[in-house]
Amino acid sequence: MTEVILGIGSRVKHSQFGKGVIIQIRSDAYEISFIDIGIRMINRDFEGLEIIEAIETASDLATYEKLEKSLIRVLRQFSDVQETVPMGGKWTGGKFVGLSLKSSQMDIPVN
């Protein structure tokens, strides 16, 4: 495919998947809903994509991907919320032992 940037709603024909409509534009790919097989990601530079009807895209179009990345970056920078990281399987069935300064012990099972 040449350097044509297709807009949302453009109709295309894929050499393997058949006819479809572009429903999302990403930085490196189009998200296309095909009639027979559903939604697939196709690289923008894929040569086997025939343009049936091109819809121009607005030059100031912000994709969901760009908005999502920007929001994640802002939230990580200004938020004290951290990612939840699952514990390793070696801890399952074990227990957490907490000792206080008054020498009392608290056992918490790890499930």
Image (tube, rainbow, N blue to C red):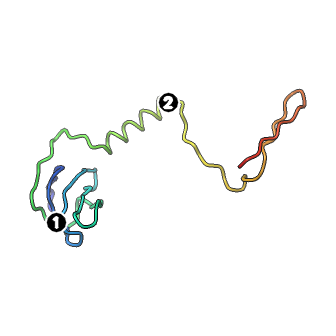
Image position of 48 (left or right of 109): left
Neighbour tally class for label 2: few under 14, some 14-19, many 20 plus, Cα within 10 Å: few
Look at the image and tell me in which quarter the N terminus lies: bottom left
Looking at the rendered structure, the kind of residue marked 2 is Ser
Contact check, label 2 and label 1, Cβ < 8 Å:
no
Where does the image place residue 7, in percent across and percent down from the top left?
16, 50
Q: In which quarter of the image is residue 38?
A: bottom left
- Determine the secondary structure under disc 2: loop
**In the displayed image of the protein, which residue is found farthest to the right?**
103
Separation of marks 2 and 1 at Cα, in angstroms: 44 Å
Farthest residue to the left: give it. 53
Q: Looking at the image, which is closer to me, 45 or 30? A: 30
Where residue 44 sits, quadrant-wise, is bottom left
Give the mark nearer the N terminus: 2 vs 1.
Answer: 1
Residue at position x 14%, y 61% in the image: 2
Residue 95, percent across and down?
A: 78, 46
**Quadrant location of residue 89?**
bottom right
Q: Given this view, does label 2 or label 1 mark the residue nearer the observer? A: 1
Q: Determine the residue positioned at 32% across, 45% down.
A: 65
The residue type indicated by label 1 comes to Lys
Q: Position of residue 32 (x, y in %)?
A: 24, 58
Q: Which residue lies furthest to the front in this view?
A: 36
Q: What element carries label 1?
A: strand
Q: Looking at the rendered structure, which numbered label has been put on residue 50?
A: none
Neighbourhood count class around disc 1 (C-alpha, 10 Å): few under 14, some 14–19, many 20 upward: some
In this rendering, is residue 81 above or below 31?
above
Q: Where is residue 70 in the image (x, y as percent from the top left)?
A: 36, 37
Residue at (53, 33) in percent of width and height: 81
Q: Residue at x 23, y 72 (%)?
A: 16
Name the mark on residue 79: 2
Outermost residue toward the bottom in this view: 16
Which residue is disc 1 drawn over? Answer: 13
